[in-house]
Image: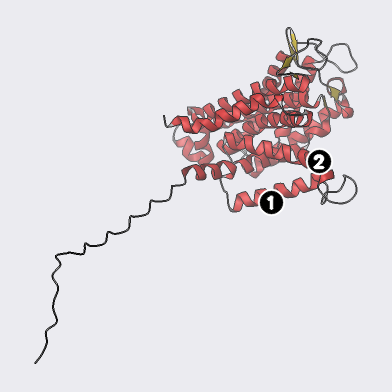
């Protein structure tokens, strides 16, 4: 019975997520798609950085690899940009597999480096990925990018071009509504799997490597293999996130997968709390939704200027807020949002006040001493 109160907020959040397409407009649906795609990528990065202790600034490379793999696999064959014309389901699976293989190929380097040196090495992956996306035009479309084939399963399409009419509770389920449930069906198992990995023997080995590589080796843990495992898992998550981002955008270009994307993923997991799956999800939602919401309602906020006017625009303000949030986390909430939530749950209830002492009865048998008079 003690587990039920802890699961009630999760069940309520799940019910809200399932019912959200019934009352949200297209802007919020699109924002939710971007957020759920970022949640998958942030969970993979927190397993690498927060659990295994391996700094990576190249997450955008694996995200780009997954996005282009999906676009190439599911794209139509015979066009200006190459495509295999295979099932989009297979493209989604291959996005994670190809990114995982790339992470495995990079693992010999990650096994020999750590700390800032590993971070600098992973930055090179971002520049390598951009060079490939710009120059391999037959697959990526070059600088202008390429269109992304809509997701579909046999007999059902997730695009607006589906002639079959689908309505629930009077709401016509179009492409964004259908993609919402597809993304939810990917993000929820990704979070569940990450929690199991973290609590498993593999997760404990990664945590030991993070705390002390010498101590982990003394305990019989193969340090290089553990690092490689962390990179493979994180890269697979990034590849799937890239495929989801490609579906959310509908068209991908090299500028979407620059170094700024890697930094944004780091901000997500730092704000949420390193090593926390729920914290990574919360940080991803905050980082993705904040600039979109500010941009959407910038005309109603008097202190925001239009982009390019030289004033404080929504994108710049969001960067300032990210920086302030990171400083607040490092100074006051060392565990991030997850740590703050955990402290609130564990906060002891105030002790009950002691009852006031009872007044002694009037006919008390306490002996009294009478005053003696002197002659």
Q: Position of residue 189 (x, y in %)?
A: 60, 23
Q: Position of residue 251 (x, y in %)?
A: 83, 25
For disc 2, the neighbor class at 10 Å (few under 14, some 14 to 19, many from 20) is many
Q: Position of residue 34 (x, y in %)?
A: 73, 30
Q: Position of residue 193 (x, y in %)?
A: 56, 25
Quarter of the view holding residue 246: top right
The residue pinned by badge 2 equals: 295
Find residue 324 and name its label: 1
Residue 126 in view of the camera: yes
Residue nearer the viewer, 337 or 178? 178
- Per the image, label 2 sits on a secondary structure element best described as helix
Q: Which residue appears at 80% of the width and 44% of the height? A: 315
Q: Residue furthest top?
A: 155
Q: Is 72 situated left or right of 203 in this image?
A: right
Q: Is 75 situated left or right of 188 in this image?
A: right
83 in relation to 30, above or below? above
């Amino acid at each position: 019975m003690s587990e039920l109160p802890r699961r009630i907020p999760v069940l309520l959040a799940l019910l809200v997520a399932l019912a959200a397409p019934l009352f949200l407009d297209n802007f919020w649906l699109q924002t939710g798609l971007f957020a759920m795609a970022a949640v998958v990528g942030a969970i993979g990065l927190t397993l690498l950085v927060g659990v295994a202790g391996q700094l990576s600034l190249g997450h955008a490379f694996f995200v780009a690899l997954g996005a282009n793999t999906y676009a190439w696999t599911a794209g139509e064959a015979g066009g200006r940009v190459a495509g295999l014309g295979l099932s989009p389901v297979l493209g989604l699976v291959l996005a994670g597999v190809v990114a995982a293989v790339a992470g495995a190929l990079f693992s010999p380097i990650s096994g020999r480096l750590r700390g800032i040196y590993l971070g600098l090495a992973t930055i090179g992956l971002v520049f390598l990925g951009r060079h490939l996306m710009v120059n391999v035009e037959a697959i990526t479309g070059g600088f202008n990018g390429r269109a992304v084939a809509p997701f579909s399963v046999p007999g059902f399409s997730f695009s607006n071009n589906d002639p079959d009419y689908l309505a629930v509770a009077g709401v016509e389920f179009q492409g964004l509504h259908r993609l919402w449930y597809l993304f939810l069906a990917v993000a929820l198992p990704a979070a569940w799997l990450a929690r199991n990995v973290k609590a498993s023997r593999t997760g404990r080995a990664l945590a030991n490597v993070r705390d002390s590589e010498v101590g982990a080796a003394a305990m019989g843990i193969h340090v290089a293999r553990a690092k490689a495992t962390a990179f493979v898992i994180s890269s697979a998550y990034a590849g799937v996130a890239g495929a989801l981002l490609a579906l959310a955008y509908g068209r991908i270009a090299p500028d979407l997968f620059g170094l700024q994307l890697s930094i944004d993923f780091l901000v997500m997991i730092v704000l949420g709390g390193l090593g926390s799956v729920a914290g990574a999800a919360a940080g991803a939602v905050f980082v993705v939704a904040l600039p979109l919401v500010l941009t959407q309602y910038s005309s109603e906020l008097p202190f925001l200027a239009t982009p390019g006017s030289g004033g404080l625009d929504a994108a710049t303000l969001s960067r300032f807020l990210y920086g302030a949030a990171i400083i607040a986390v490092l100074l006051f909430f060392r565990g991030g949002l997850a740590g703050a939530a955990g402290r609130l749950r564990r906060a002891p209830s105030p002790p009950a006040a002691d009852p006031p002492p009872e007044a002694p009865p009037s006919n008390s048998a306490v002996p009294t001493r009478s005053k003696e008079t002197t002659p």
